[in-house]
Image: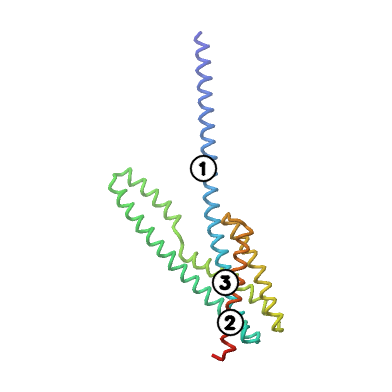
Amino acid sequence: MASNETTLNNQAKFVLQNNDLEQQAVATTTLEIEAKDIDYSKRSQWLRAAVLGANDGLVSTASLMMGVGAVKQDIKAMILTGFAGLVAGACSMAIGEFVSVYSQLDIEVAQMKREKERGSSGGSRGQEISEEEEEEEKESLPNPLQAAAASALAFSVGAMVPLLAASFIREYKVRLGVIVTAVTFALVIFGWLGAVLGKAPVLRSAVRVLVGGWMAMAITFGLTKLIGSSGL
């Protein structure tokens, strides 16, 4: 009788241990999945910002080159204008992103100091918890220099498309056509990437980006042509 009770107790302990192990395995798997989701979410935000920056560089530089091309057929003038637009735009994006992210960093650091002061007033246990949270928050703080470099690089990549398209073509009309074709192809790609990363309708997003780029180039070309022909 005693041996039967011992056997039942051992079986019960074995079952409880298995259940604990299963629960720990499920919890570990859940944490891993959540970590992967968080990493993917952060990564997709960075990628989407890079795509938008590249699209800005593409449209603004192409519009500048088309505007100059409306009044000057010289390839040198068009290339210099595009290069100036690339440098100015990349610097503007980098400085703007640096100032914005640095302001965000100051706000988050001030918030961390206030939470640390509240944690220190809660005893040693509260201080230990606040120190652990502070270390985790420090790792997740934004980096202004990294954000500035990423914005400048993304803008420059987009701006290189019309510059490369126009660099080796001497014929004026062919050069304008090649720029429009290259920019159109890049706009479709950027619109598709932005839709995929933002989980938006792909066709609608690509058409919206494409039409917006066309309008920017057409308005710049038309107004510059009008002002240039009026002799102002």
State the separation of the CA atoms marked 1 and 3: 39 Å
Residue 230 lies, in percent from the top left, at 57, 89
**Residues at marks 2 and 3, CA–CA distance in whole angstroms:** 13 Å
Q: Quadrant of residue 44?
A: bottom right
Mark 3: secondary structure? helix
Q: Please name whichever residue, 152 or 67, is drawn nearer the observer in this view of the structure.
A: 67
Residue at image x 65%, y 65%? Answer: 188
User: Residue beneath label 3, please?
Assistant: 57
Query: Which residue lies under the disc numbered 1?
Result: 31
Q: At label 2, which amino acid type do we have?
A: Thr
Circles 2 and 1, Cβ within 8 Å, touching? The answer is no
Q: Going 46% across and 71% down the picture, which residue do you hit? A: 95
- Residue, disc 2: 81
Q: Quadrant of residue 161?
A: bottom right
Q: Horizontal and vertical percent for residue 6?
A: 50, 15
Q: How is the image coloured?
A: rainbow
Q: Secondary structure at mark 2?
A: helix
The kind of residue on which mark 1 rests is Leu
